[in-house]
Image (cartoon, rainbow, N blue to C red):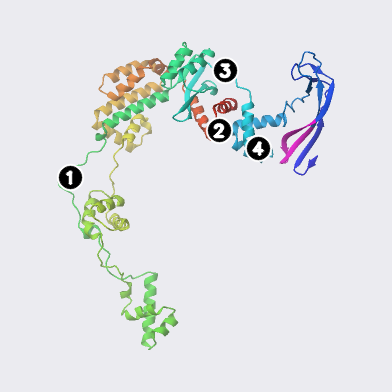
Amino acid sequence: MAEGELVVVRARATAERAGCSVCGVRSARVHSRYVRRLADSAVGHRRVVIELQVRRFRCGEGACRQVTFAEQVSGLTFRYGRRSAGLQVVLQKLALMLAGRAGARLVDALAVPASRSTLLRLIRALPEPAPRTPRVLGVDEFALRKGHVYATVLVDIETRRPVDLLPDRNVSTVAKWLTAHPGVEVICRDRSLAFAEAGRLGAPDAIHVADRWHIWKNLAEAVERAVVRHRALLREPRADNSQGVAVPNTAELAPDAPAEPRRSGRLSDRVREQHAAVHDLLSQGIGLRVIARRLGLTRNTVRRLANAATADELLIGRWTGRTSLLDPHKPYLHQRWAEGSTTARRLFEELRERGYEGGESVVKAYVRKLREVFPHDDPPRKNPSVRDVTSWITRHPDRLNDDQAQQLKAVLARCPELEQTAQHVRAFAELMNNRQGQDLGQWIDRVQANDLPTLHSFVNGLGQDLDAVVAGLSLPYSSGAVEGHNNKIKMLKRQMFGRANFDLLRKRVLLAA
């Protein structure tokens, strides 16, 4: 039955017997009847309410503490529920996906209103997920409060699904979980010594696999330190200029515009027509006031036209021939232009340091004239930065364009130590891409044979966790799935604003998956 914006469905239970909610014994002795109002999924964007007549039965088991119990309709009702079982499941799934505020906005649009607190309570009411024991386990930390509180996420690398969330990142907590869940054969982790120790304590027989991305990141940091040590050699040496720079004279470099009147254009044509008309009327003896009225001009305009012998006098600019604040500094501008400095902003700052009191727009206009007369076909190339050279060394050579490859070649030619570093980096990249972890010892020996302090520091770090590094460079496992879930957790935290408590976050991560 439809009642305005509400659809009411009236029904009653017809089963002869019902099972006790405590002991499970079925009974046919009816104690009483009452009506339950259950919200259900909307129909035609109108709310649906089911008015269900149910019965209370007497429990026939003498030892049962439950004297009477209410019957439940399978698939429709549940104990103490004010909505249908189907709608309850829908709201739980929406809450897991969208949490409070976003979920409340969506269910309101679906004509099934529920507050954000109700949705969060639905998540917390869900049963605790039972962690399973994976064969290949990924371990990583994530921030509950960045810089202060950290927790641990455990992921099944083979299925790429989260297994459990631990409230902290302590060695004892992770080791205790591993002890309680025997069967882990491989542990994928970053270079953290805490997780390494927890794995040795909780799963002593498991193989530790250091993540390749973190290994390469550590190598890139070592390369960057090496480039910083030789950053003075990154600049390209300037060509010998002892003979001085030939500076063209002012007239040749930027000739001034001649003080001549305009010969064409709408303004010049109009001025010439008005000048001829005014002087024609003056020759007829007509006064300036009458001329202004006839031509639709102001008296001052007519007076100016009448006082000019020719129209050319009116077409020469007011500022033609006048001096500029930039004039004393033009020789310096010409010198810097010939040296290759063509950026107006930089030239303006240099002039200001030399006492120039004018504006930047004047310098820009003059530089524009210089650029039109004497364009620079080959502007000076920017010197590579430390980050540029680090990126070129650690990047695949096929991904460098011709200019980058040329600049890298020039830098390595000026610095033999960086050349050796680049060779070792390429060898390590081939070793990692081809999964040749068994050759890592030979690579380490070659690095130690050269005087490369930054790579020696990287090699010493590998030695602290050598077995895991060798496994990481040999086995196909990695922590990529763990990093993906780490990013997902960050998204869930932002979605729930300040209400992402650990218990709520844990259920959203594990049950939504």
| Crowd class of label 3 (few under 14; some 14 to 19; many from 20; radius 10 Å) | few
Question: Can you tell which quarter of the image residue 250 is in?
Answer: bottom left
Asked whether the viewer can see residue 371, the reply is: yes
How far apart marks 3 and 2 lie (CA) works out to 27 Å
Q: Mark 1: which amino acid?
A: Asn
Q: Can you identify the residue that label 3 sits on?
A: 132
| Tag in front: 3 or 2 | 2
Q: Are marks 1 and 2 in contact (CB under 8 Å)?
A: no
How far apart marks 3 and 4 lie (CA) works out to 33 Å
Question: Which range is magenta?
Answer: 35-51
Q: Can you identify the residue that label 4 sits on?
A: 107
Q: Considering only vertical position in the picture, is 427 above or below 274?
A: above
Q: Considering only vertical position in the picture, is 266 above or below 97?
A: below
Mark 3: which secondary structure?
loop
Q: Mark 2: which amino acid?
A: Arg
The structure residue drawn at horizontal position 63% and vertical position 37%, both measured from the top left corner, is 104
State whether the magenta stretch is mostly helix, strand or loop.
strand
- Disc with the residue nearer the chain's start (1 vs 2): 1
- Disc with the residue nearer the chain's start (4 vs 1): 4
Q: Can you identify the residue that label 1 sits on?
A: 241
The structure residue drawn at horizontal position 26% and vertical position 49%, both measured from the top left corner, is 341
Which mark identifies residue 499?
A: 2
Q: In this view, does 456 lie to the left or right of 156?
A: left
- Disc with the residue nearer the chain's start (3 vs 2): 3
402, 352: nearer the viewer? 352
